[in-house]
Amino acid sequence: MSPKINPNSGMLTIGPAQIALLERLSNAVAVSGNEDEVRAIVLESVKPQADDIRVDAMGNVLVTCHSKAAHPLRVMLDAHMDEVGFMLVEDEGEGIYAFEVLGGVDERQLPGKAIWVGKDHLPGVIGAKPVHLAEGSEMHSAIPLKSLRIDIGPANGGKVSPGDYGTFATKFQKSGPSLFGKALDDRLGVATLIELVKHHPDNIELLVAFTVQEELGLRGAKVAAVALHPDLAFAIDSTPAFDFPRPDEKENTQYNCRLDGGPAIYIADAGTLSDPRLIRFLTQTAEKYAIPYHFRQPGGGGTNAGVIHKALGGIPSVSISVPGRYAHTAVLMARLADWQNTLRLVYTALQDITPEVLIPDRN
Amino acid sequence: MIELSAFLKELLSLPGLSGYEDPVRDVIADKWRPLVDELSLSKLGSLHGLRRAAAPGSHPSILLAAHMDAIGLMVTGIADGWIKVTQVGGLDMRILPGQMVTVLGQRDLPGILQMIPDRLKDKSKAGNPPKITDLFVDVGLAAREVTRSVKIGDLVSFAQLPLEMTGGTLAGHSLDNRASVAALTLCLEELRPFNLAWDVWAVATIQEEETLLGARTSSFDLHPDIAVAVDVTFAKGPGSNDHHTFPLGKGPTIGVGSNMHPALTTRFKKTADEMDLPYAMETMPKYSGTDAMAMQVTAEGIPCAVISIPLRYMHTPVEMVALKDIQRTARLLARFITQLEPDSMEIIFAESRV
């Protein structure tokens, strides 16, 4: 058995600067189809250390950090820039707009929320008919999505119009060990990738994709994988932690993943069977550096790995997520320690990876 | 001059749930102190501001009641760091999932109010709105830290910050009924230069959202000749357009119905007409849902009026009002009061007699 390596030696650390960057990313509005604000932060942040930066036809930011090796392994990292949100679709007058939801948002999460709308983040609200006026029968079902409107006040003077985007107006905050904010799915991944560009290991050709439209069907990653044609890929995302007590007080066997569990490594989801060689490599790396990790429960859901692994002639892929509670709602919660450990796992994996990892199993 | 938007935002950022109105009451008291001759508290905690009539001796009196309490939640239990809650005031469970809240424990803790996800529940209940027992607050702290900082009975307030919207509108939680507290404050300011014939009691009442307790007890203590409940009413908006609703930004409503003395309804209408002030008549056939319900039947009975400020999305954290409706309400109340003469009681009631 090899001795454990001190997990703090030569590791990347999440400090105030990294948290400040996550805060900027979380507060930025980048609904699927209009990722401008996050793209601008990404471009600004990666510029000093990147060897090549491209914005492709869809709006993905594709960053290359060259290796010093002669025939380096080409490793792709993916994190999606977009978040769930809304598009205004009809001006009903007096500042009231009908809207459509972009991405999978439970309609029960919408009524009674503050919203930012348009380029200027104009404050708006999604209200609800007063409970006093609700018929008894209405109370037994969720407030229907089609009855909801975004209201920004009667004199917006044409500052917003149908086609403009909006999302939950939630300001990032830190409390104890936890991070609260909107769109931590997947700004945690975006912030992680920015750190890895800043401190890119030079044993590999690092290909970093900050992708668009994940929430609408993994669209950005599909073309990014083709453009970068990597040897293998890691999708870095945030996956829901359903680590709640069950109402029937039985053991919760459907937790998906847990806060404080460290990075959640995917084995199987609705879109991908993770490459077993990469799963094994990640777990060996985590154990070597004493980084806590756990497996995301095999099941539904998915990440950009779902399209990346099918691209070109096939790209060995695995997903690693920062556990997060309350995905696709106004405010998500994640643990600083889980983010830290995710960054460490990916960083050490990149440093240690060799082409031998992909040698086919012989047994 | 009181800057309405700033004052209202200050009121909205303070807790003051039913039964625990102290934090907001202290700020209201500071604002009222220079505007009244006497400031006192009822035995149960309602704030009484007295503006005396100019002439010496005894005078008839009018009481203006605006409730200062707010709806919210209360901690009922803590298990493994999960905080269970019940409601304070009438909440709509359907708007609670995903709200940011502040747990008013040993220290203020930010928290997320959420529901147990469908995947952990009986499949037949998937998609249903949560029951109060499906809801919990997650403060993101270790279980032992939660146990140390939070106890049963602690209050949980909505954390939604006030939003300045376009067209002179403001959104936030507790505008029901801090909007009316602001209107009363502006009314007191409006009254300052006038010599008054009547004593005026401005009362910020407690526990309206629970039992109308403050209005019931303060109107008994102060035994006014007339009482006016100032509250919010339903503004027209998405999903709310029937006869219970009134346009936002088009003036206050004057209540007509069983809680209101018809003579006072008539006098308020006449006053608004003389001022050319926009308003709407609000029919409240059975009950007004305001402090007037309690004041009307206090002691030997008190003639009441109800003036209301239209508000969208009542009892959500994003209630919305038009600032000018608050200002108009203040002006209407002030004009009504400055027109009172020592013998107005007889005149007002004679006016309405057929």
Image (cartoon, rainbow, N blue to C red):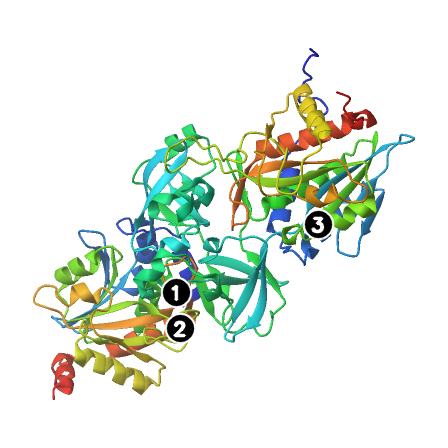
Residue positioned most to the right: A70
Q: Nearer the viewer, residue A139 or B339?
A: A139
Query: Is residue B178 at all visible to an observer of this figure?
Result: no
Tell me the element at label 1. Answer: loop
The answer to whether residue A36 is seen in the rendering is yes
Q: Chain of mark 2?
A: B
Question: Where on the picture, by quarter, is residue A307?
Answer: top right
Q: Quadrant of the C terminus of chain A?
A: top right
- Residue type beneath disc 1: Lys
- Please name the residue shown 63% across and 30% down the image: A341
- Per the image, label 3 sits on a secondary structure element best described as helix
Q: Secondary structure at mark 2?
A: loop
Residue at x 31%, y 71% (from the top left corner):
B308
User: Dot 2 surroundings within 10 Å: few (below 14), some, or many (20 or more)?
Assistant: many
Residue tagged 1: A129
Determine which residue is flagged by label 2: B236
Q: Amino acid at mark 2?
A: Lys
Sequence-earlier tag: 3 or 1:
3
Name the residue at the front extreme: A363
Q: Name which residue type carries label 3.
A: Ile
Tell whether label 3 touches label 2 (CB within 8 Å). no
Q: Dot 1 falls on which chain?
A: A
